[in-house]
Image (cartoon, helix red, strand yellow):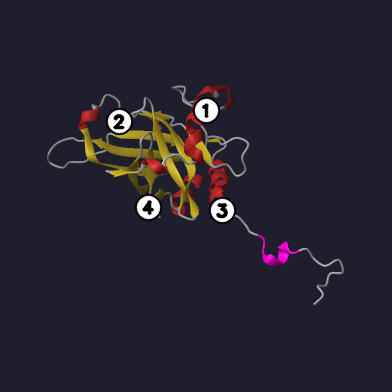
Amino acid sequence: MATIRADRRRTKAGVFVGTLLGAFLLAGAAFAQSGDGRQQGWKLEPNVEPPSYAVIEPVKTNLNIEALVLTCEQAGDRRVLQFQLYVSPPGPLLPAGSNPRELRADPSAQMQIDGRVYPISLFFAEDYVVLADAVADRVPLVSDRLLDGVQDGKTMILRFDLVAKDRGGHRSFDGEATIDLKAAPGGSAVAAVRHCVDPVAKPSARSAWPPHPSGNVSG
């Protein structure tokens, strides 16, 4: 079972995610709701351009998932994007009615977007689960291919094999979450967060140097 060291947990997004989730769940009037009262649509980090994270709730799930977060993380000398799953109440990711003692040591997952399956890996931190399909500098991340699918897609279905079934090695998905990717603001929210990994442009030495008033630099 993959884990993430605690010293990687408290990034900029991680520091604010508790407050963000609380505000997100209280701001029901600002979002469309599903039949069970869950909020639909991405909630972007406010007053930041580009935003460093966006939050969305599943419209349907049999898991103890509070929200899925698309967030920027530092990986060496560059930034990458991760999907982080937060659960409620705090504890392991579980299907409804399951016993935590029955969790398997080698859980697995897949992401399906509009019928197309994307293999993903699970990485467990202290208070969230990372979903990723690539790694850079030992930091799990979401590839551009998968981000394109999320940005352009309509429906995401997350499937998990979390509970040990028998000793014969049989595997089957026992947890599922459905996310409406097209609920407003839809793919534009994902596109906005993707800009947080853009390299910061640095002025060249020539452009930084004040030009001579006449337009020529004397020798």
Which of disc 2 and disc 3 is earlier in sequence? 2
Q: CA distance from mark 3 to mark 1?
A: 26 Å
Label 4 amino acid?
Arg
Which residue in the protein does label 3 denote?
Answer: 198
| Mark in the foreground, 3 or 2 | 3
Look at the numbered discs 3 and 2 and tell me whether their residues touch, using CB distance below 8 Å.
Answer: no
Image quadrant where residue 67 sits: top left
Secondary element type, mark 3: loop
Image quadrant where residue 111 sits: top left
- Determine crowd level at label 4: few under 14, some 14-19, many 20+ residues with C-alpha closer than 10 A: few
Label 2 amino acid?
Leu
Residue 188 at x, y percent in the picture: 57, 43
**Could you tell me which quadrant the C terminus lies in?**
bottom right
User: Residue reaching furthest right?
Assistant: 214
| Mark in the foreground, 1 or 4 | 4
Which of disc 1 and disc 3 is earlier in sequence? 1
Q: Which residues are magenta?
A: 203-209
